[in-house]
Amino acid sequence: MQAPTTHLSLPFFDAAHRDIAARLPAWVSAQQVDEHDDRAACRDWVRRLGAGGWLRYCVPGDCGGALPQLDSRALVVLRETLAFYSPLADFAFAMQGLGSGAISIGGSSSQRQAYLPQVASGARIAAFALSEPEAGSDVAAMKLQATGARPDCVAGQKDDSYFLDGKKTWISNGGIADFYCVFAKTDPAGGSRGISAFIVDAGTPGLDDSIHIPVIAPHPLATLTFERCRVSGEQMLGEVNGGFKLAMQTLDIFRASVAAAALGMARRALAEAIHHAQHRQMFGQTLADFQLTQAKLGEMAALIDAGALLTYRAAWMRDGGHGSMKERSVAAAMAKMTATENAQRVIDMALQMHGGLGVMVGSKVESLYRDIRSLRIYEGATEVQQLIIGKAVLA
């Protein structure tokens, strides 16, 4: 099956995005990756995506990137296409971008040159470590502490080094990453204004990333434990206590791309449903001949397009600076909420149309049914997006 490209004619996209859409489907469909071991498969996908030049869209141009700056529309096209063929390939691509995004946005020149070219080539695997056992949607509730290593360290001032103590969990690429962008409290009483960001290399003494988390759609997840994990002050990203803003800026760039991944999965589910309906014989005709089937397929297509238009608008607004920062955030929230929720509905309808075949382990719609579920939670659950939108409407 080929991923559709007709939506690339919409005015949201330009020649660079259409070029990606023209080249990527043939490349990704030609890859043969054994995905039974999700960790080995993700390493393989990162290597292939790097060799193919696709990870260059995860970093800015001055650090080996394909475009001058991180481009939301390019990320949207890439993730939608990759997710159509392999949600795990999409995951591997997205985590390279999200995991290194804080370096792209807030890293010093030396930090950017040390890490981002290797992210682009696939030589290093990145991870974004924000969530904690009691701090998911409520980021300000994080408890991971970063304390100055010297007795005379004063909160709010950079010191030569810091000790990290605490836990992070639900960390994508946990256990296979070569480095983590970690967010920790440098001012415990400062709430969201007391968070700083650090680059922590895998293997740093005091960091344990071996506790893997199994989930319904297997992909690398882990809990990270920090115990007197010492990091140099040079590994701090941006300003002291500026980590919350950096985390939100990173998520803001990639939120529309989560919606795009959902679109890719929904488009694949629709394609599978159409193929099944056209070939399944029932009562002397095909399943597609029944008006009820036609109505369902029509609803699925409309749900996908509704999410797609919001997604493309959000990416276009972010790239072009259209509207205020608040308006761009609301547009991204609408896209993420609508595309992921609609994709869940589309995939469920596709599975229902397949009947017993839909719940057979190994069928495409069965795996999509598991793959889509986490997208309604990570990088801002649907309920968080509703709050963002609702507050904006009330204002």
Image (cartoon, rainbow, N blue to C red):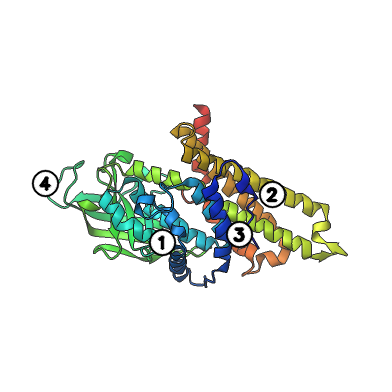
Q: Crowdedness of circle 3 by 10 Å Cα count: few (<14), some, many (20+)?
A: many
Q: Within 10 angstroms of label 1, few (less than 14), some, or many (20 or more) residues?
A: many
Q: Which mark is residue 173?
A: 1
- Structural distance between the alpha carbons of marks 2 and 1: 33 Å
Which residue was labeled with disc 3?
A: 369
Which callout, 3 or 1, points to the residue nearer the camera?
A: 1
Q: Position of residue 324 (x, y in %)?
A: 46, 31
Q: What amino acid is labelled 3 in the image?
A: Tyr
Q: Quadrant of the N terminus?
A: bottom right
The Cα atoms of the two marked residues, 4 and 2, are separated by 62 Å
Residue named by callout 2 = 301
Give the tally of numbered discs. 4
Of residues 380 and 135, the one nearer the viewer is 380
Q: Is residue 367 left or right of residue 229?
A: right
Note whether residue 329 is visible: no
Of marks 4 and 3, which one's residue comes earlier in the chain? 4
Tell me the residue that label 4 is attached to: 152
Task: Tell which circle, 2 or 3, labels the residue nearer the N-terminal end.
Answer: 2
**Mark 4 → mark 3, Cα distance in angstroms:** 54 Å
Q: Quadrant of residue 113?
A: bottom left
Q: Secondary structure at mark 1?
A: loop
